[in-house]
Image: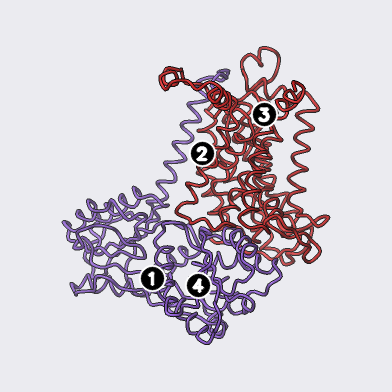
Chain colours: A red, B purple
């Protein structure tokens, strides 16, 4: 009996258990509403179905959220990722649209390299503002968030740039082994980041900087450099996400690409269990967080929840996820079930810190 | 991050200074068109404040106003408000000080215009609203509102569908891609379309979700519509871009857009007209940004003191595939 309880605790106590459980519940609810929700069929040589849509559409969010995870774990935040998505997508599409042969692989690679390079510069700009000049991250990245949107519109001249390029389209809509290519790109990025942070000391260094930058510096870690790199990496992830978003519809819309993705990314990071105060990060949690957010959006469309109530629906689910996932809340809930306290006892209790 | 205080104060000063200069520079650019006063030289001076340059539609709108002002011999003072009401109010006050003959603007938002409009009225300068309206209770603050009738656009789309499906015996399943929730074009087009299709009880909207006027939004919503509803006969999208996004979702589902699913949209931007000419769309109700010539006519009339109607609709039409093929070579946007 004790052993079973122990195992039960070990499973439910795992930090990924509750986010994963929420994801399963959401998929189950969809399946109950429409039994065909999880069904996948083979169409034109690749898999087709709502779960595949969720995977494909969550790929850009996973990428952006990966970079955001590292930035947040250094105690910072990057609000500019949405604008970086828009700028990188705009540069790539603009370059391709000007070429005589849009289907040439060389043209697409050149476009990607150029846009990626600009994104790295933008990331470095954020990094310098935060790590060298010492501006608060929320303000430093807000500059690029606002100015970057304008920059993207300047690049596209306020127009929606439509392109007709098969190699570029593949980034968003291509398939590999019957699955969307985008999800492989996102997973590859996740594996690379995981390998660098968890197989080397880098991850620990990032967490130590996030925990206490000054103490880390005194311990011999070049805090500034670590913070700088986190912002560059975040912009790099956002650039690839921007390619996927624009490739998905073969057009760059400076106004709409990546709009509000920074908020979704922060939410994914938080759902995944990473502390907004910095000092701790969970890449796998972030990925599940991104999947939850995309599943939520897809659920609204699949169930045709009316637009007037869908925002409230999303808010309720997000609040529920965050509460369920907070150990302090769960502890209080289980305690209350065992031993119901009087209302006074609840009111007198000091407020507990719930990790966001 | 607040704990990292290894940098010196001068650096911060430089950063702050740089951002101030940046912002100042942008503001100066915004006002560069509005310099100089105007005296009575017989030429009408029109001060125009544009919302911004957020879409292809808006850019075409700006071009139309600039070109037709030149053609009509009206001196145009143009200001881009970059989506900010305070910029727009500042521009209007500038125009009042410069004593322009007529002020026209596309309000960024509906409310908060009473004070500045009253200033213009007191200065004796007539105001024309274009494209979007204001919610001022005092209608005497502006001469007229020139813009599209979104309800009518939805109704035209619906009436065409009713005509097409008049012989349909069974139910016709319609899915709708709405604009941003709460936006006037989305509300009005939905209303107009709904009223028109009520004429035939067989026509039913089985799903309706916001695609936020974007291609990505339209595509993502359509993907789920297609999976949740095995039989979709008609798609009504509140603008071309959402319809264009939906095209890919329909193709991916193994259906032929324009044949298996009848597609109706609103706007008639270039890419949308191309899709219509290619037979992928079936019908577009135009929402024309080319209101420049009408605006110049109005400016002359109100300057001459003539009475004008309080509400003037932009001249708009509808397109079928054949009409789109014909019109496409001459489209400006």
In three-dimensional space, the C-alpha distance between marks 1 and 4, rounded to whole angstroms, equals 19 Å
- Work out whether mark 1 precedes mark 4 in sequence or the reverse, and give the earlier one: 1
Above or below, comparing residue A241 to residue A159 in the picture: above
Rendered location of residue B237, percent (x, y): 52, 68
Identify residue for label 1: B151
Above or below, comparing residue A272 to residue B251 in the picture: above
Give me the chain letter of mark 2. A
Rendered location of residue A124, percent (x, y): 64, 35
Q: Secondary structure at mark 4?
A: strand
Q: Secondary structure at mark 1?
A: helix
- Work out whether mark 2 precedes mark 3 in sequence or the reverse, and give the earlier one: 2
Rendered location of residue B289, percent (x, y): 43, 69
Rendered location of residue A150, percent (x, y): 51, 49
In three-dimensional space, the C-alpha distance between marks 2 and 4, rounded to whole angstroms, equals 47 Å
Identify residue for label 3: A281
Give me the chain letter of mark 4. B
Give me the chain letter of mark 3. A
Identify residue for label 2: A143
Nearer the viewer's eye, disc 2 or disc 4?
4
For the point 53% across and 24% down, the residue is A336
Image quarter of residue A324:
top right
């Amino acid at each position: 009996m004790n052993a079973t309880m122990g195992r039960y605790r070990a499973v439910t106590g795992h930090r990924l258990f509750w986010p994963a459980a929420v994801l399963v519940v959401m998929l189950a609810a969809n399946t109950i509403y429409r039994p065909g929700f999880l069904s996948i069929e083979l169409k034109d040589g690749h898999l087709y179905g709502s779960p595949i849509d969720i995977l494909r559409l969550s790929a850009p969010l996973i990428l952006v959220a990966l970079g955001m995870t590292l930035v947040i774990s250094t105690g910072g935040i990057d609000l500019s990722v949405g604008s970086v998505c828009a700028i990188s997508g705009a540069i790539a599409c603009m370059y391709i649209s000007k070429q005589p042969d849009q289907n040439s692989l060389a043209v697409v690679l050149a476009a990607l390299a150029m846009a990626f390079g600009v994104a790295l510069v933008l990331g470095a700009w954020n990094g310098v503002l935060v790590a060298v000049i010492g501006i608060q991250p929320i303000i430093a990245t807000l500059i690029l968030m606002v100015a970057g949107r304008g920059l993207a519109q300047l690049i596209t001249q306020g127009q929606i740039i439509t392109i007709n390029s098969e190699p570029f389209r593949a980034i968003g809509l291509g398939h590999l082994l019957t699955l969307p290519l985008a999800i492989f790109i996102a997973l590859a990025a996740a594996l690379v980041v995981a390998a660098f942070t968890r197989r080397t000391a880098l991850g620990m260094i990032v967490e130590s900087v996030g925990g206490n930058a000054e103490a880390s510096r005194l311990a011999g870690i070049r805090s500034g450099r670590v913070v700088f790199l986190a912002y560059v990496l975040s912009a790099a992830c956002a650039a690839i996400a921007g390619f996927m978003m624009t490739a998905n519809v073969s057009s760059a819309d400076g106004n709409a690409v990546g709009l509000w993705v920074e908020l979704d990314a922060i939410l994914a990071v938080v759902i995944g269990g990473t502390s907004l105060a910095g000092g701790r990060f969970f890449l796998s949690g972030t990925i599940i967080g991104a999947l939850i957010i995309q599943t939520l959006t897809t659920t609204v469309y699949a169930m045709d929840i009316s637009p007037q109530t869908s925002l409230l629906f999303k808010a309720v689910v997000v609040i529920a996820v965050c509460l369920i996932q907070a150990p302090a809340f769960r502890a209080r809930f289980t305690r209350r079930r065992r031993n119901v306290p009087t209302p006074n006892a609840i009111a007198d209790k000091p407020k507990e810190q719930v990790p966001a | 991050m607040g704990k990292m205080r290894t940098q010196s104060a001068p650096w911060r000063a430089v950063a702050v200074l740089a951002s101030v200069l940046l912002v100042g520079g942008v503001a100066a650019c915004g006002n560069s068109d509005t310099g100089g006063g105007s005296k009575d030289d017989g030429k009408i001076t029109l001060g125009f404040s544009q919302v911004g340059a957020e879409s292809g539609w808006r850019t075409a709108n700006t071009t139309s106003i600039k070109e037709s002002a030149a053609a009509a011999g009206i001196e145009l003072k143009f200001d881009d408000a970059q989506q900010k009401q305070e910029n727009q109010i500042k521009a209007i006050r500038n125009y009042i000080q410069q004593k322009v003959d007529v002020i026209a603007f596309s309000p960024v938002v509906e409310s908060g215009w009473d004070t500045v409009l009253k200033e213009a009225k007191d200065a004796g300068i007539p105001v024309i609203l274009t494209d979007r309206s204001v919610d001022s209770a005092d209608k005497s603050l502006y001469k007229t509102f020139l813009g599209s009738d979104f309800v009518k656009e939805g109704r035209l789309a619906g009436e065409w569908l009713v005509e097409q499906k008049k012989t349909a015996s069974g139910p016709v399943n319609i899915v709708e891609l709405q604009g941003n929730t709460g936006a006037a074009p989305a509300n009005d087009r939905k209303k107009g379309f709904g009223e028109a299709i009520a004429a035939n009880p067989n026509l039913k909207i089985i799903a309706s979700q916001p695609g936020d006027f974007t291609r990505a939004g339209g595509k993502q919503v359509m993907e789920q519509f297609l999976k949740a509803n095995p039989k979709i006969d008609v798609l009504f999208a509140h603008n071309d871009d959402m319809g264009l996004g939906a095209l890919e979702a329909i193709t991916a589902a193994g259906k032929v857009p324009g044949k298996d699913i009848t597609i109706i949209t609103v706007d008639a931007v270039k890419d949308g007209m191309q899709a219509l000419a290619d037979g992928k769309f079936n019908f577009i109700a135009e929402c024309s940004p080319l209101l420049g010539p009408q605006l110049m006519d109005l400016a002359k009339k109100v300057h001459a003191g003539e009475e004008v109607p309080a509400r003037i609709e932009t001249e708009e039409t509808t397109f079928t595939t054949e009409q789109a093929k014909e019109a496409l070579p001459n489209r400006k946007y």
